[in-house]
Amino acid sequence: MIEQSLMVSGLIVGVIFGFVLQRGRFCMNSAFRDIIVMKEYTLLKAVALAIVVQMIGFHFIATMGWIQLNPKPLYWGAMIFGGFIFGIGMVLAAGCASGTTYRVGEGMMGSFVALLGLMIGGLITSGGALKELTSYLQSNTAVTTADLGITAGPLIREGSTSLTLANVFSLDPWIFVVIIAAVILAVLIWKRGGKQTKAEGTLYEKIFKMGWNWWVTGIAVGIVGIMAFLALQTYALGISGGWFGFLNALVTGDPNKLNWFTFLVIGVVIGAAIAAIIAGEFKLRAPDARRLLQQFIGGLMMGIGAVIGTACNIGHILTGIPQLALSSILGGIFIILGCWTTAYIMFMRG
Amino acid sequence: MSADAKPNEVLDVRGEVCPYPDVKTQKKLKSMKSGEVLEVIVDYPLSAERIPRSMEKLGHKVLKADKTGTGEWKILIKVK
């Protein structure tokens, strides 16, 4: 059973994360899909800024010795296959792992159904019928630092053999952090949008009643991620693993299956519900039967993809890419490709 | 044209999930004549904020975007 202090820190970080996600409408499915379907870049800018804040933050707290980076191991076949399946799933489910979770807190029953699918898909793939596929893909396509004859490099956890942009080029990670951050920030400032829709209202209304500006959301998500790393020590934000642990603990009756992320995701639902209720946006609502089925299948595919590819959009794109992990960069690319392929077929033909 | 313009058509996308409210709005506007007004009723917060933004970008005129109740918005759009 996980320590009580970790349960509490998971819940607290989760509630804050849920509040931020709901206020910022932070959903990576929308962020990536909207680029091609609607030529809308607002959420993408929030995602990019969150990645930059975390990249600088993670490397700073690691340099200070408060944490050690923990990039995920690279299984290229699993990341490509799992990422693509996850990307297809999130379009069908109408939300990524984090988007689906915070929308449950808004009262959206379609997202609740997608979440059930995600949990079931995860268990099938980690310990059930698809277990063999997972272990086959992961064990046959693994590449480690030992294979390349290099070391993990500075700031990374003792014993890690995971590849990062920094260690494959034998360069200091800060070189990549500074260059990537500078490029993304330059693009964001250049593309910040000439005509800012100036929201009118008091500070209270801006925080609790209106949707946030993309840059507020990006910075807030980034800060929550840094808090998560300091609290958990071994990793920062992740969503899908928490839900898998939740269902696993329920069906086996084994409380050891609960993990820090389980408390985080429960916190996210609570935080999002609080934010939605204050803003007057909480409402129990459901789409029609056809759409519910579509969302369930999408959730199932997200669960399968997240286990095979070792993380969801949050674990890879939000937490792994800022650590410069090759696994997460590859997984993230294929999540986006899966999303685009499906969005094109569903929304752009004809 | 005043902001209280009577809509020529009403599109109710309550209950719909991301991004159907947006996609359906866009399709509906395409089927309408220039100068006509569409009223969209939506209960999905992200779309309620995104529809006015993206429809303006497409050249349509957003006459009104109001929160009309708990988790419910009405958007009036004039076709370009």
Image: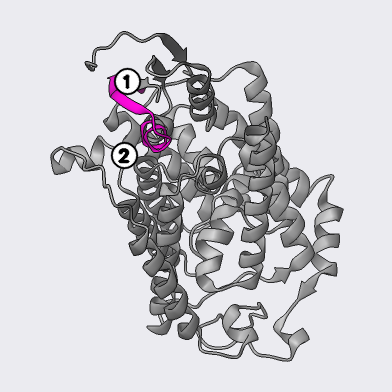
Q: Residue at x 59, y 49 (%)?
A: A240
Magenta highlight range: B52-74
Above or below, comparing residue A5 to residue A247 in the picture: below
* Quarter-of-image position of residue A48: bottom left
The disc labelled 1 sits on which kind of residue?
Thr
How has the structure been colored for display? one colour
Q: Is residue A325 left or right of residue A174?
A: right
Q: Which circle, 2 or 1, is nearer the viewer?
A: 2
Which image quarter holds the C terminus of chain A?
A: top right
| Residue A59 among those drawn in magenta | no
Where does the image place residue A97, in percent across and percent down from the top left?
Answer: 56, 45
The disc labelled 2 sits on which kind of residue?
Gly
What's the mark number on residue B70? 1
Where does the image place residue A264, in percent across and percent down from the top left?
Answer: 47, 50
How crowded is the residue under tag 1: few (<14 C-alpha within 10 Å), some, or many (20+)? some
Where does the image place residue A157, in percent across and percent down from the top left?
Answer: 56, 80
Give the CA distance from mark 2 to mark 1: 15 Å
